[in-house]
Structures are given as C-alpha cells and as structure tokens.
Image (cartoon, grey):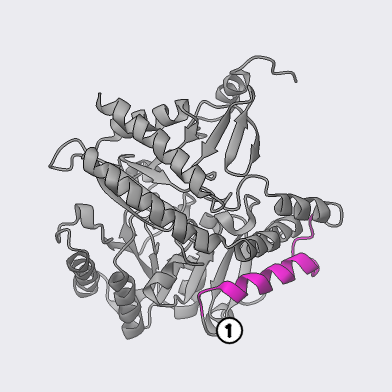
Amino acid sequence: MRLPDMGAWRKLAERYFAPAWKVDHPVEVECGEGVHLVDRQGNRYVDFTSGYGPTLTGHCHPRVVKAIRHQAGRLIHTATTVYNEPVVRAAEAVLAVASIGGDPMIHFMNSGAEAVEAAMKLSRLATGRPAFIAFRGAFHGRTLGALSLTTSKGLYRDCCEPLVPGVYFAPYPYPFRSPFGQDPEACAQGCLAEVELLFEHIVPPRQVAAMFVEPVLGEGGYVPPPISFLQGLRRLCDAHDILLVADEVQSGFGRSGRWFAIEHAGVEPDIMVIAKALASGMPLSALIARREIAQKWSPGAHGTTYGGNPIACAAALATLDIIREEGLVENAVEQGAFLLSELRALQQEYPMMGDVRGRGLMIGIEFVQDEQKTPWPEAVQQVVAECRARGVLLAACGPRSQVVRLLPPLILTREQAEYFLEIFADAVASVTR
C-alpha cells in the first residue's frame, strides 16, 4: 500500500484502531537513531519519551540490532518446549545485576503488567494470604489484576469493576502535595503511619500477602519517595511476614542512576518485576524472586507462550552489555544531575514550574496555576506542543496530566541535554506570554 501524502498513516490509524490506541504526537516516524526519531519528511526529533521507557540504549543501537538480526537467523521461537541458549544466558545476566539476595530465580514474560499479575499470583501462593497493599497514584498495568493495584488515573479503572478483591491503598509520599506537609521525612512517616492504620482498622497484617510499590512513582507523577519510606516498608513487611514487591518496570536498568531504583534506599525486595528497558524495545519482562519464594511454584503452575523469546533475550543480553560497557548508569547520574540543576534554576524564573523532582534521568516537572498549587494540565499540553514544534518530543503524566516527564535514552550527551534545555525554556516562555 502506498502512503504518499503526509498524514496518510494517521488517517488510516484513526480509521482502523480502537480509540483506546492513544497517540501522543501527530508525527509519522519512519526511523530512529540514537536519541532521535525521524519523520517522513526527514525532520529529526530529540526523543525524551523513549517509547515510555524501553529505548533506554537509544533507538536502533547497532549492537542491539546486530544481536536481533543474528538471532533471527538462527532461532525465532520455541516457547518452553525445549531449552535454548539465549534465554538461559539472559537469565544468568539479569540475575547477576538483580537487587535481590537469597540466590534468586527468574521467570520471563512479555510485559510489565503480565509480570505484576504473576507477582500477585506467586505472593498469594507463597504466603497463603489473600490481600495486597498498594499505594495511591501508582501504575502497575492495565490488565485486570494489575489494574486492581493501579490508581494513577481514574480513567483506567472506569467501568472495570469488580476488580480483584482484597486490595487496600495507602498514600504514597508525595511531598509537593502531601497532607503531612512538604518536609520529606514528615511525609514519609505520615504515609507509613497510614499503612499501620490499615492494619489496625481495615485489614489485619496476617491477611496481607504482599505490598506492591514503585521505588519511584511513575505514571502517577514521577515522584521519588524519601528513602526512609522504602526502608520503613521493608521493616513493616519483615515484622508481619509480608512480601515486598518492587515494581521496577519503568525505573529499572539505570534509569534512576542505579541499576534499580530501590537500591537508593539500601533495601532488597522479596520480588521484583522488570520490563521496558530490559530488551531495548523488544517485548520482554520478568519476575525475579528469592529462591524459597519462587520454588513455591510447581512446574507449569504459571507460564506464557512468548515469554523468554530467543530474539528478545538476545536483545536483552546486548542491552545489559551496553549499559555496563558504555557507562549508562553513570551517565544517568551525571546528565540527570545537570538537568535537575538547570531546570531548578529555570523554575526560579517561571513559578508555574511548581515542582522539579527526579532521580537520574527520570525527572518530573509539575505545572501549577497559582500559589495554591492548582494543577495546570493545559500549560503542560502547550509546552509539549511547543517543544514538538521545535523538535523535542515529551510526554505528560500525573492524575491530571499536569506533569511533564523526562525519560530520554541513557545515551544522552551533555550537548543534547543543553539543546533540550534551550528548547524547553523557549517553550515555557511562549506559554507565559
């Protein structure tokens, strides 16, 4: 089929795709290279979305492309009917960097939501308990089980009840909008106290199988919690024999400036779910659990046809090598600190940038209308559109889409970061005129 005119792909998509298939930018992309996407007219865009996180090594990194091409010529798919080298080597490589002790084990799947669902099943099986605790503002996926833990937007849960029963919510420490005040430690302790109130009034801890937490709140607003909050959750879980599940789907593999964001708190989860950046855009996710927990699963008790696909696993091996050998975790620290510093300086000029926060190259900029911190999603929409017109692609997050989120590939250079800052400053200025 020939699509000669600009806009043809978009017109066909709008005709064929269900409206749930939401596209952020009216840009028809033909190819990607490094931090750039290139449209049909040859315009280059600096991509600060990374496809919502997966293209952490950049678009079409030559080593990832080479690994995919090589594996595609040897073996495309087997499921779990036989062993194959890429899936075994990928398991070994991932477990070598996993932030879990106790000689962990892994189970490969396809998406973050699928891995979360598996963690829910395994937690109930391992503990014999029915209930879960999750945190307000969290995003764990949109399949029915994962959605039961998700509260980042009411839209996702609209008309989906009844969801999985036995899920209870506590507040996530969000200092900029906390009822406990803006002091991070007061906020953290207030939220931990709310968990204990759940135990006292609503669900006895002996009924709770697991707590699910994002070590950095993602879709809910890009909020890094005080490290004492995650440490407090670990203590509560230990005190009541509850499993701590870290959802590192978006924050993992160096995004936060550590291999996994929970490492900032110096604690280990019992189960960790990973996806997105694991295979540089190929569909691959995993559940990692301490051995004594993972061994509760009988053979065949959980499975998936495409999980651990040889091509995706080959891409994962290349991805992990690139992260280590090209120093991408260290680069996330360096470029993230630079961006945060410059954005906070810009914030002094534009108070509409109510809060600038983040860890590594996982940064949120929350826009407000006034001193009462009224969310300003319209300003975010305008800034995103102005940046796109100038050659930078951004995405929004937060319950009212009032936060600009920055998640560029970790190959971002200082020159590219400075280019982004120039474009972003111009966009913010244009919105305030």
The residue under label 1 is: 103
Residue 84 visible in rendering: no
Q: Nearer the viewer, residue 427 or 367?
A: 427
Query: Extreme top residue here?
Result: 5
Seen in the image, is 360 located left or right of residue 192? right
Q: Nearer the viewer, residue 267 or 432?
A: 432
Residue 9 image-quadrant placement: top right
Spot occupied by residue 55 in the image (x, y as percentages of width and height): 58, 49
Query: Extreme right residue here?
Result: 74
Spot occupied by residue 255 in the image (x, y as percentages of width and height): 49, 58
Against 417, residue 181 (above or below) is below
Give the number of marks: 1
Find the magenta span and give its range.
Answer: 76-100
Q: Nearer the viewer, residue 379 or 132?
A: 379
Spot occupied by residue 350 in the image (x, y as percentages of width and height): 24, 37
Q: Amino acid at mark 1?
A: Asp
Residue 265 image-quadrant placement: bottom left
Residue under the image location 46 percent in, 28 percent down? 390
Query: Callout 1: 10 Å neighbours few (<14), some, many (20+)?
Result: few
Residue under the image location 34 percent in, 47 percent down? 342
Seen in the image, is 119 located left or right of residue 95? left
Spot occupied by residue 238 in the image (x, y as percentages of width and height): 35, 83
Q: State the quadrant of the C terminus.
A: top left
User: Is 86 part of what is drawn in magenta?
Assistant: yes
Residue 428 visible in rendering: yes
Against 49, residue 267 (above or below) is below
Q: State the quadrant of the N terminus.
A: top right
Residue 76 image-quadrant placement: bottom right
Against 237, residue 68 (above or below) is above
User: Is 341 part of what is drawn in magenta?
Assistant: no
Seen in the image, is 4 located left or right of residue 199? right
